[in-house]
Image (tube, rainbow, N blue to C red):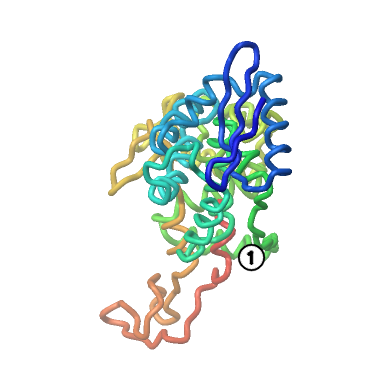
């Protein structure tokens, strides 16, 4: 066991079970170097600083990122893996081809400062830092360079539950346009079944017992979320309306999704709906002309060529409810 100073940085060199370990301690302070060396020896005794970790640490960041994603395939769902891939985009750009073993605490701080300059919130930055933390932990480097790095403080904003009047107003207005049918029925299920948005999107016809008036959540965010939900009359009516629509479009087979994908007007029942964001945005912005009753985007004059009424001061009855979508 030996501590050697090369330039301004201390390095450790020791043997464990006949295997040699050499590593930079990335400090110029003698006492801190001694502490880090003891930590490394303890990790080695526990079998946490083997050759695989050292080989991973020598990889360039892109190679390590690819290896990391490959290793997470069995742990993550397709959606979560896609999210992790997206979180790595800015990390790849910042660290380039830097070897994992050369990433320092100062570089981690520099990455955060660099990201703050973009129009991105602390939650996103914390998630990106979470990815690189997991990569550095696999390389047994996090305790050396980032253990004292605290997450950015995220603003906490509590949502509010809609009142009964707001719920009824929203659903009545949504029923006025067939283009909002999917968003309206999804909202009805969310309000009457306690289902999460992701659960509604993944619902298939084989999960619904129309005769028994129940639906089964086979896959949820947590094991406790896997449950059988009885359908009250309102939710059951929504299911019947969805069933009738599915039969019209040829999407009522057991394996088909209750809320099928719709891209550029093409409905594919073998794929699930990704989002109701566009429909919900239009729904919570649309206004109704007091003269002719035409639904339209906010404007100064009614879009109806024969009406042309002044609608500049008309406001949507669903204004402010846009954040309540499933």
- Residue at 49% in and 31% down: 57
Q: x and y percent of residue 302 in the render?
A: 34, 81
Instruction: Judge whether 102 appears above or below 304 on screen.
Output: above
- Residue at 57% in and 70% down: 320
Q: x and y percent of residue 206 in the render?
A: 51, 25
| Label 1 secondary element | helix
Numbered circles on residues, count? 1
Q: x and y percent of residue 192 in the render?
A: 66, 46
Instruction: Judge whether 128 appears above or below 220 on screen.
Output: below
On screen, residue 277 versus residue 159, left or right, reads left
Residue underneath mark 1: 166
Pick the residue in front: 306 or 182: 182
Where on the picture, by quarter, is residue 32?
Answer: top right
- Residue at 39% in and 55% down: 179
Pick the residue in front: 317 or 277: 277
Which quadrant does the N terminus fall into? top right
Outermost residue, left side: 305
Pick the residue in front: 29 or 302: 29
Q: Dot 1 surroundings within 10 Å: few (below 14), some, or many (20 or more)?
A: some
Pick the residue in front: 31 or 253: 31
């Amino acid at each position: 066991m030996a501590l050697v100073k090369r330039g301004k940085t201390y390095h450790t060199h020791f043997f464990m079970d006949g295997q040699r370990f050499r590593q930079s301690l990335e400090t110029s302070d003698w006492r801190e170097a001694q502490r880090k060396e003891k930590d490394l020896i303890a990790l080695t005794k526990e079998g946490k600083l083997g050759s695989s970790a050292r080989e991973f640490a020598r990889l360039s960041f892109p190679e390590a990122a690819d290896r990391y994603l490959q290793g997470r395939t069995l742990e993550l769902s397709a959606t979560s893996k896609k999210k992790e891939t997206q979180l790595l985009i800015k990390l790849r750009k910042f660290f380039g081809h830097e070897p994992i073993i050369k990433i320092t605490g100062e570089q981690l701080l520099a990455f955060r400062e660099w990201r703050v300059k973009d129009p991105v919130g602390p939650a996103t930055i914390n998630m990106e830092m979470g990815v690189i933390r997991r990569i550095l932990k696999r390389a047994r480097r996090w305790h050396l360079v980032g253990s004292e790095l605290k997450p950015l403080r995220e603003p906490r904003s509590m949502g509010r539950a809609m009142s009964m009047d707001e719920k009824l107003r929203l659903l009545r207005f949504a029923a006025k346009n067939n283009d909002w049918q999917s968003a309206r029925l999804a909202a009805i299920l969310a309000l009457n079944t306690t289902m999460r948005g992701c659960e509604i999107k993944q619902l298939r016809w084989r999960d619904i017992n129309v005769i028994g008036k129940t639906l089964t959540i086979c896959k949820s965010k947590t094991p406790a979320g896997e449950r059988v939900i009885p359908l009250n009359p309102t939710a059951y009516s929504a299911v019947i309306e969805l069933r009738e629509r599915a039969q019209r479009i040829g999407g009522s087979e057991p394996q088909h999704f209750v809320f099928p994908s719709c891209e550029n007007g093409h409905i594919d029942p073998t794929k699930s709906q990704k989002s109701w964001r566009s429909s919900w945005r239009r729904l919570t912005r649309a206004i109704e002309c007091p003269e002719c009753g035409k639904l339209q985007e906010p404007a100064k004059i009614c879009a109806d060529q024969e009406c042309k009424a002044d609608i500049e001061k008309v406001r949507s009855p669903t204004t402010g409810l846009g954040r309540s979508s499933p």
